[in-house]
Image (cartoon, helix red, strand yellow):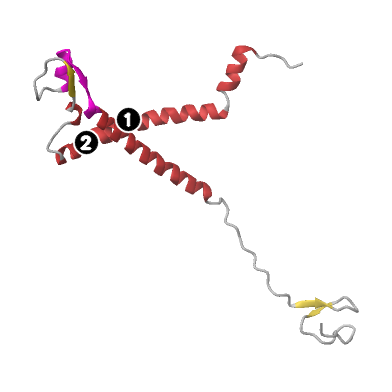
Amino acid sequence: MKKKKGIIGEFKEFALKGNVVDLAIGVIIGGAFQGIVKSLVDDIIMPLVSGIFGNVDFTNWYLVLRGDVSAGTSLAAAKEMGAITFNYGSFITVLINFLILAVIIFLMVKAINKLRDIPLKKKVEIIEEAPTTKMCPYCKTEISIEAVRCPHCTSDLKEE
């Protein structure tokens, strides 16, 4: 009869499995990596894109759904005024973050898979050479493959 482990035993078994630990490490590294990508987008890419579109800050692109907000008011000021806004500029920034993160992760996975395909040891190809000797059918001595008479027993070797 199988002994029951209880909830604590089951949790310990689950938490200490290798896959769970690997997943936790991946989530932690992914969170840190997300911060790097967010900085890349917010501090480098978005200013370049804003420069192309005429020095516009995407985070201040919004539509007022309810409230009295004058044109040109920043998103933060509109929210302080109690306006309900549809923040599509922030969504564009988050979407760009996601796309960059997805491309970087794709490239990393592709590189890791390529590294997995490289064997640790190079396979040595053995090329078999044509035999240079044969056995005498009479005295069982190894002789040259071109011999027509055995040098040991002097038997006449028939061509086959």
Which residue lies at the image location 40% right of the left edge and 31% below the top edge?
Answer: 30
- Judged from the image, the secondary structure of the residue bearing numbered disc 1 is helix
Is 121 left or right of 52, judged from the image as shown?
right
* Image position of 117 with respect to 16: above or below: below
**Residue 19 found in image quarter:** top right
Q: Amino acid at mark 1?
A: Gly
**Residue 151 found in image quarter:** bottom right
**Residue 36 found in image quarter:** top left
Q: Which percent across, then down, holds residue 77?
A: 14, 18
* Label 2 environment density (alpha carbons within 10 Å; few <14, some 14–19, many ≥20): many
Instruction: Decide which of 62, 48 is in the foreground and name it.
Output: 62
Query: How far, Cα to Cα, is label 1 from label 2?
Result: 15 Å
Q: Which percent across, then down, holds residue 26?
A: 45, 31
Q: Which percent across, then down, holds residue 132?
A: 73, 77
Q: Earlier in the sequence, mark 1 or mark 2?
A: 1
* Image position of 10 with respect to 148: above or below: above
Q: Does the magenta-highlighted stretch encompass residue 89?
A: yes
- The residue range painted magenta reads 75-90
Q: Does the magenta-highlighted stretch encompass residue 18?
A: no
Is 143 left or right of 78, judged from the image as shown?
right
* Total residue callouts: 2
Q: Which percent across, then down, holds residue 44?
A: 23, 37
Q: Amino acid at mark 2?
A: Met
Is 59 left or right of 141, judged from the image as shown?
left
Q: Quadrant of the C terminus?
A: bottom right
Write down the residue under mark 1.
Answer: 35
* Label 1 environment density (alpha carbons within 10 Å; few <14, some 14–19, many ≥20): few
Which residue lies at the image location 18% right of the left edge and 36% below the top edge?
Answer: 47
Task: Please say if the residues under marks 1 and 2 sit with CB atoms less than 8 Å apart.
Answer: no
Q: Quadrant of the N terminus?
A: top right
Write down the residue under mark 2.
Answer: 46
Specify the farthest residue to the front. 65
